Amino acid sequence: MGSSDTEGWVREMVAEMESKSPGEDGPSGTWYQYAIVDRSTGETAGDIGVGFGIPGPQQAEIGYRLLDSFQGRGLAGEAVGMMVDHLFSERGLHRLTAAVVAPNQPSIRLLEALGFRREGVFRKSFLCDGEWLDDYFYALLNEEWRGARVPRG
């Protein structure tokens, strides 16, 4: 895909997100994209996608990407943690899920640090550069998140 194709796709996605509220149906279904912005520079560092209603009511699947130049600075952990808190505290969701390809150890560490637990492995379910890779399936319940955030003492 050429840069003009990418730019057109981004323009279409932004227009769709501006035309609907999170969770509403549209050309991309109930998925809603949020930008991750580096507070120190104001630059867009990546995005978080939330598939509301996936796999069912009061649930959402989350996915996230961070541009290479922003990795290793804690931005993804901060952004995903804030989104998890928003989805549970403000949106009142019951359960969140995320799928991570097995070689992506930084993403696995991020999810586990936030309290997500591995619920399953989809063997050789993700084709990447001609190689079939395992996908790990993670989940977190609202009550687990609240329990992890209750001050101890």
Image (cartoon, grey):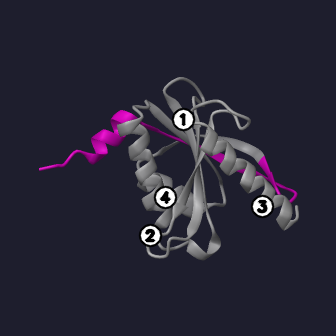
Q: Residue 39: which disc?
A: 2
- Is disc 4 surrounded by few (<14), some (14 to 19) or many (20+) residues within 10 Å? some
Indicate the quadrant where residue 99 lies: top right
Q: CA distance from mark 3 to mark 1?
A: 27 Å
Q: Quadrant of the N terminus?
A: bottom right
- The stretch in magenta equals 126-153
Contact? badges 3 and 4 (CB < 8 Å): no
Amino acid identity at mark 2: Arg
Where is residue 80? Give x, y as percent: 48, 54
Q: Earlier in the sequence, mark 3 or mark 4?
A: 3
Identify the residue at horizontal 60%, vertical 29% (top origin).
55
SS type, badge 1: strand
Q: Earlier in the sequence, mark 3 or mark 1?
A: 3
- Going by the picture, which residue comes out furthest to the top? 57
Front residue of 69/6: it is 6
Tell me if 133 is positioned left or right of 65 in this view: right
Q: Amino acid at mark 4?
A: Leu
**Which mark, residue 110?**
4
- State which mark lies toward you, 2 or 4: 2
Question: Mark 2 touching mark 1, by CB under 8 A?
Answer: no
Marks 3 and 2, Cα distance to the nearest angstrom?
A: 24 Å
Q: Secondary structure at mark 3?
A: helix
Three-letter amino acid code at the position of disc 1: Ala
Identity of the residue drawn at 17% across and 49% down: 152
Residue receiving disc 1? 60
Query: Mark 3 sits on what residue?
Result: 7
